[in-house]
Image: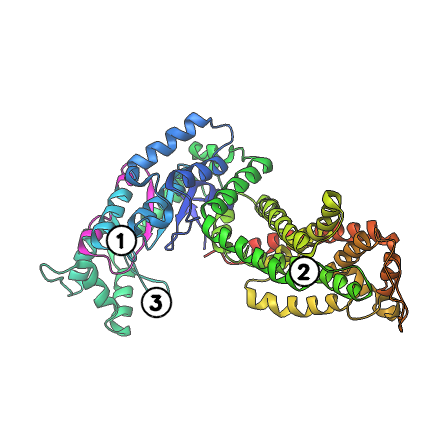
C-alpha cells in the first residue's frame, strides 16, 4: 500500500517529521520533574535556532493547554495515569506536528482521567491538528468525543468508516439497532464479534454500500487534484518547515544527556549511598586479614595476596555493577532515539563519561581503607603509587561492563559469556600459574586480561621500592631478599609498567569502541514498541 497525505505519497522521513506518536505505555526518566523533562526534550528536539525564551513560551503554553500546571514541578514517578498521558502528549506536541497518532490513550485510566485526556485531544483538533487514535471498548462519554470512527475486524478488514453518528445508522440499516441508553461502542463491537459469518456479512455490506463508494470517490478526487507524482513541497508549503530544522550538535546532546544522568544519580542518592557503604564494607573485610602485614619472607605471600584481592575486587565490583546500565534504560533510550530526541553516539558516551567520577571516587575511598588498614608504607607518594593501578583497573572495567551491557539484551545472557571470560583471563594474571611457563600458544591470553595488567602494575609499583627483605638465619628454603626477586618469582618484569598502563588504556578504548558499535546497531535493529 501507499501512505499519502492529501493524495500525495510521503516517505518515512517526512512522515516522522510531520507527525507525532503517543504510545500506550508512557515511558520517561521517572526522577525528572514534568518541567525538567519538557525542557530536556525541547532543547534536543526543537530547532537549535529557537531561543531559550521561545522554548519556555512553547513549554508554558503546552503545560497550560494540557492542564499540567499543578504538577509541573512534580517528579514523573508521582504522576497519575492521566497526568502521564498528558505529559506524553505535551512531549510530542513540542514540535507542533500536523498529525498525532495515539495508541490506546485511555487504557488503564478511570472514566474521569480518560474523559480529560480525550477533551485535550479534542481541543487539539480544534486547532487544526489531525488526531488518529486506536481504542478498545471506549465508554459512551469517550466515544462521542470522536468525529470519525473506523471499525476493523481480525485480518484488517474494514467494517465501517465514517462519522460517529453514521455508524449507528449503518448498523441500523443492517437490522442491528442500538437500544436506548446503551453504549454505542459496546453495541457495535458486540455485533462485530458475534460470529464470523455476521462479521463477514457486515464487512461485505459496507464495501458495497454508498458510504464506501462516496469515500472512494472522495479519495480519488483528492489524488487527482493533488497529482500523484507531484512533490509534496509543491502542494503543502507548511511541510517545508519540518525539513529546515537544524538539529542540536552532538556536543549539545551529550551535555544534556550528561545533565540528565547526573541529576538521576543525585536524586537516587539513597541507593548510591547504600552502594558506597557496601563497597566500603567490602574494602574493610578484604583488608582485615592483612592487618599490619610485615615485609618478611612470610609477608611476601600475604602482601602479594593483598595486591591480588584489591585489584580483582575493584575489577569485579565495577564490571558487574555497570552491567545493568543499558538494560535498565533500553526502552526509554530506544524510544527517544527513534523520536529523534538524540542519537546513539552521544547517549552511549554520555553514560560512559558520567560513570567515571563515581568509579574514581568509590575506588579511591576503597584504596584509602585498604591502605590504612594494611599499613602500606610510603606516605602520600606511597598512596598514589598504591591507588593508581587500582583506579586504572576499575576504569578499564567500566568499559568492559558497558561493552557487555550494550552487546546483550539482558543480564542473564551477558553472564553466560562474562563469567567464563573472567575465569579464563583471571587464570593468566600470575596468581595461579607462573607466567614464564605458559605455553607459547596461550601467552596471548594475558594481553587481553585486565587482571594481568592491573596486578602486574600494582606488583611493580609496590615491590620495586623495596630493596631489602630480611631472611631468617635458619632458612631452609631459598630466601627472596629484594622486591625485584619477588617480581621474578611471580613472572613479572619491572620494565612492563608502562606496558601495563598502556594495556589498560587500550582495553578502555577498544572495549568502548566495540560497545558503541554494538549499541548503535542495537538501537537501529531492536524493536522500539
- Name which of mark 1 and mark 3 comes first in the sequence: 1
259 sits to left or right of 305:
left
Q: Where is residue 22 in the image (x, y as percent from the top left)?
A: 38, 49
260 sits left or right of 426 in the view: left
Left or right: 51 as drawn, with respect to 467: left
Report the front residue among 392 and 87: 392
- Look at 27% across and 69% down and name the residue there: 199
Q: What element carries label 2?
A: loop
| Residue that carries the numbered disc 3 in the rendered image | 154
Dot label at residue 291: 2
> Eyeballing the image, is 41 above or below 377?
above
Which quadrant would the C terminus be assigned to in this image?
bottom left
The span picked out in magenta is 123-146
The answer for how far apart the CA atoms under marks 1 and 3 are is: 16 Å
Quick one: SS at disc 3? loop
Give percent across and percent down for residue 174: 18, 64
Q: In which quarter of the image is the N terminus?
A: bottom left
Amino acid at each position: 500500500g501507499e501512505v499519502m497525505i492529501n493524495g500525495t505519497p510521503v516517505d518515512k522521513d517526512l512522515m516522522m517529521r510531520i507527525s507525532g506518536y503517543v504510545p500506550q505505555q508512557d515511558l520517561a526518566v521517572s526522577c525528572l520533574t514534568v518541567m525538567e523533562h519538557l525542557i530536556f526534550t525541547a532543547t534536543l528536539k526543537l530547532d537549535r535556532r529557537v531561543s531559550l525564551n521561545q522554548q519556555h513560551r512553547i513549554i508554558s503554553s503546552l503545560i497550560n493547554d494540557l492542564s499540567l500546571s499543578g504538577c509541573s514541578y512534580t517528579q514523573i514517578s508521582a504522576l497519575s495515569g492521566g497526568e502521564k498521558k498528558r505529559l506524553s502528549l505535551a512531549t510530542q506536541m513540542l514540535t507542533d506536528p500536523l498529525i498525532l497518532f495515539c495508541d490506546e490513550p485511555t487504557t488503564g485510566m478511570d472514566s474521569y482521567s480518560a474523559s480529560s485526556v480525550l477533551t485535550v485531544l479534542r481541543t487539539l483538533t480544534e486547532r487544526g491538528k489531525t488526531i488518529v487514535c486506536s481504542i478498545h471498548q471506549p465508554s459512551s462519554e469517550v466515544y462521542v468525543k470522536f468525529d470519525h470512527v473506523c471499525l476493523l475486524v481480525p485480518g484488517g478488514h474494514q467494517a465501517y468508516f465514517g462519522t460517529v453518528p453514521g455508524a449507528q445508522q449503518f448498523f441500523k440499516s443492517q437490522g442491528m439497532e442500538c437500544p436506548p441508553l446503551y453504549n454505542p461502542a459496546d453495541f457495535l463491537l458486540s455485533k462485530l464479534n458475534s460470529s464470523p459469518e455476521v462479521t463477514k456479512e457486515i464487512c461485505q455490506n459496507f464495501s458495497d454500500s454508498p458510504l464506501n463508494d462516496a469515500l472512494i470517490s472522495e479519495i480519488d478526487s483528492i489524488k487527482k487534484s493533488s497529482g500523484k507524482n507531484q512533490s509534496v513541497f509543491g502542494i503543502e508549503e507548511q511541510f517545508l518547515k519540518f525539513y529546515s530544522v537544524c538539529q542540536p550538535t552532538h556536543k549539545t546532546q551529550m551535555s544534556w544527556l550528561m545533565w540528565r544522568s547526573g541529576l538521576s544519580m543525585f536524586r537516587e542518592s539513597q541507593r548510591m549511598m547504600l552502594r558506597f557503604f557496601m563497597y566500603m564494607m567490602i574494602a574493610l573485610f578484604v583488608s582485615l586479614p592483612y592487618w599490619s602485614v610485615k615485609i618478611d619472607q612470610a609477608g611476601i605471600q600475604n602482601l602479594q595476596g593483598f595486591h591480588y584481592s584489591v585489584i580483582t575486587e575493584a575489577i569485579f565490583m565495577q564490571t558487574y555493577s555497570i552491567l545493568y546500565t543499558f538494560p535498565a534504560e533500553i526502552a526509554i533510550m530506544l524510544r527517544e532515539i527513534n523520536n529523534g530526541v538524540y542519537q546513539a553516539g552521544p547517549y552511549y558516551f554520555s553514560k560512559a563519561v558520567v560513570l567515571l567520577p563515581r568509579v574514581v571516587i568509590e575506588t579511591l575511598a576503597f584504596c584509602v581503607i585498604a591502605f590504612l588498614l594494611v599499613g602500606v608504607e610510603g606516605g602520600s607518594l606511597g598512596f598514589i603509587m598504591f591507588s593508581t593501578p587500582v583506579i586504572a583497573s576499575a576504569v578499564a572495567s567500566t568499559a568492559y561492563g558497558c561493552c557487555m551491557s550494550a552487546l546483550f539484551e539482558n543480564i542473564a545472557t551477558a553472564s553466560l559469556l562474562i563469567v567464563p571470560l573472567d575465569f579464563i583471563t583471571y587464570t593468566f594474571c600470575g596468581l595461579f600459574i607462573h607466567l614464564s611457563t605458559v605455553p607459547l600458544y596461550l601467552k596471548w591470553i594475558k594481553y587481553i586480561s585486565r587482571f594481568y595488567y592491573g596486578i602486574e602494575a600494582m606488583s611493580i609499583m609496590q615491590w620495586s621500592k623495596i630493596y631489602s627483605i630480611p631472611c631468617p638465619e635458619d632458612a631452609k628454603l631459598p630466601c627472596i631478599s629484594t622486591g625485584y626477586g619477588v617480581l621474578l618469582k611471580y613472572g613479572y618484569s619491572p620494565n612492563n609498567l608502562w606496558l601495563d598502563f598502556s594495556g589498560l588504556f587500550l582495553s578502555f578504548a577498544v572495549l568502548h569502541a566495540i560497545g558503541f558499535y554494538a549499541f548503535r546497531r542495537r538501537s537501529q535493529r531492536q524493536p522500539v514498541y
